[in-house]
Every structure is written in structure tokens, then in C-alpha cells.
Amino acid sequence: MSTGHILEVEGLHAHYGKSHVLQGVSMRVGEAELVTLLGRNGAGKSTTLKSIAGAVLPTGGRVRFQGADVAGQPPHRIAQRGVCLVPEHRGVFKLLSVEENLLLGQRRESPWQLDDIYRVFPRLKERRRNGGGQLSGGEQQMLAIGRALMNHPRLLILDEPVEGLAPVIVEEIVAQLKTIKAAGVAILLVEQNLEVCVQLADRHYIVEQGVIVHEAANADFVADHQVKDRYLGVGLA
Ligand SMILES: Nc1ncnc2c1ncn2[C@@H]1O[C@H](COP(=O)(O)OP(=O)(O)OP(=O)(O)O)[C@@H](O)[C@H]1O
Ligand SMILES: [Mg+2]
């Protein structure tokens, strides 16, 4: 039985020691859908992403991916199923070349091979022989996303992919994410830059103190200034 959702999170809990950080997060991502998870600093966004990907062990609730309950499985097992988390600090190997970094993610059965990555990210092709340490912040982010694609994700999870990047690079990455989405990859995005979020997303969730407090389709979210002010403390021009 298919629900049309690739990811279904139900009542997810997570602790750091005695600190009860996720207190029953429920959310869904559809096939080829781009969903954002928004919220203030410390609300539990990164912890939610890590709990889905297995980097943090959930202490309660369900994570169903393509119908299978994956909560509690080790990260590599969840990744094998097609959940790829690109964490905040990017994880580019500085002493390896761009191409070597990409090949680390390679899977023979993936529809995303080197040429496909270079088509989406022409800068990476130009820089293929450069060391990871020689890349700009934006190029490192592209490389991290490209490597995740090589690993054949059905769900790509991105934690603040454009944080600290120059506006022109942000625009480039937004266009690249649109291309990746159009290829049918579902994306779960955490990003503080609301302009980026509303350009890309089909739907948004807002998390506050470890609970989802709001859900909206993109058009409704864009029109709803009260919600942005109340939960995020920002207005959107
Ligand atoms: N490794 C950790 N050990 C203990 N507490 C942690 C750890 N990581 C996060 N926390 C705490 O858990 C809560 C949720 O953190 P999380 O990183 O999920 O928030 P976030 O919404 O991603 O915030 P930000 O916008 O700052 O990235 C915060 O109170 C944070 O201080
Ligand atoms: Mg975070």
C-alpha cells in the first residue's frame, strides 16, 4: 500500500542525555516533493534531520521510509536505502581532489554518475583536479551535494546549504536544487534564508521546542505574515 509519501515521521522523540529535545515530531515528505523544516535557533531542526538519517538515535516514535520502519537503524543502513544527509559542516575531504571526493559517493546503479554531476555543477567540472581545500564555501557545498547525489538518494536532506554564502552563489545553488528536484529527488531542507525556502518549497513545517507547530503549502505560507512573525520572528517583504 502506497501513501504517496516517501518519508513519514510520526511522534519522533530524541534526547541528548537528560535533555528532551524532540518531543513528538510528525511530518511527511511526498515523492519528488521539496519540504522545508523551519524554526528558531535551537528549535530542533538539525536534531530532526539527524534522527531521520540515524546520526542521532531516536528515543521514541517512527520513521518510515518507502514504507519500511528505519528508526533505530545505523546511519549507513538508512543511507543504503536512499536517505542522504548533507550535514551543516559539509564534510568535504580537503586533501582529496574534487573528483576523488565525488567518487567516494559513487554507486554503480546510481542514475547520478560523474558526468551527470558535472552537468548540474559546471564549476565542479572546472575544478575537478583541485583539492577540496582549495574550494570556496559555495563550491564545497556543491561538492557535498554532488557526492550525496552519486550515492543515489531518493531523499536528499540538506541542513542550511546556503548559510554564509554570497547572494550570487546562493542563486546558483537554488537553480541547481531546482534541477535536482525536477529530476524526481525528494528534498527535506532546513534553511534560515526564507527567500530561498519559498523559491524552492512545495510545503513548510515549523518546529518549536521539539514539536511541529505549523504546516502550510508554500503559497499559503508566503501570504501569511502573521505566522512568519509569530514563529520565526521575521517579516518577508
Ligand atoms: N550534541 C548535543 N548535545 C547536547 N545538546 C545538544 C546537542 N546538539 C544540539 N543540542 C541542543 O538541542 C537543542 C536542539 O538543537 P538543534 O541543533 O536540533 O537545533 P536547530 O533548530 O538545528 O538550531 P540552529 O538553528 O541553531 O541550527 C538545542 O537546545 C541545542 O542546544
Ligand atoms: Mg541546526
Image: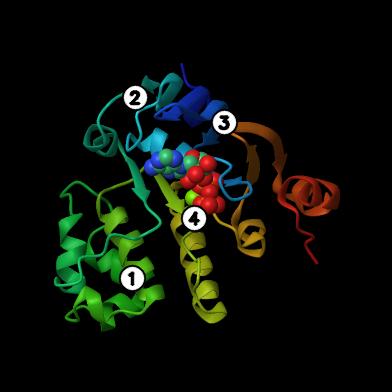
Distance from disc 3 to disc 4, alpha carbons, whole Å, reads 22 Å
Distance from disc 1 to disc 2, alpha carbons, whole Å, reads 29 Å
Which one is earlier in the sequence, the residue at label 1 or at label 3? 3
Name the residue located 40 percent from the left edge and 26 percent from the top edge: 58
Question: If the image is split into quadrants, where does the C terminus sit?
Answer: bottom right
Which one is earlier in the sequence, the residue at label 2 or at label 3? 3
Q: Which residue is mark 2?
A: 70
Question: In the drawing, does residue 160 fall left or right of residue 201?
Answer: left
Name the residue located 25 percent from the left edge and 30 percent from the top edge: 74
Q: Is mark 2 within 8 Å of ligand 1?
A: no
Question: In the drawing, does residue 147 fall left or right of residue 166?
Answer: left
Tag 2 near tag 4, CB within 8 Å: no
Q: Which residue is mark 3?
A: 27
Pair 2/4: label in front: 2
Callout 1: 10 Å neighbours few (<14), some, many (20+)? many
Amino acid at circle 3: Met
Tag 1 near tag 3, CB within 8 Å: no
Which one is earlier in the sequence, the residue at label 1 or at label 2? 2
Mark identifier at residue 182: 4
Q: Which residue is mark 1?
A: 140
Callout 4: 10 Å neighbours few (<14), some, many (20+)? few
Which one is earlier in the sequence, the residue at label 3 or at label 4? 3
Amino acid at circle 1: Gln
Say whether residue 58 is visible: yes
Give how far across and how far down residue 144 sits, in percent: 32, 62
* Numbered disc 4: secondary structure: helix
Amino acid at circle 4: Ala
Give whichever of 74, 231 is nearer the camera: 231
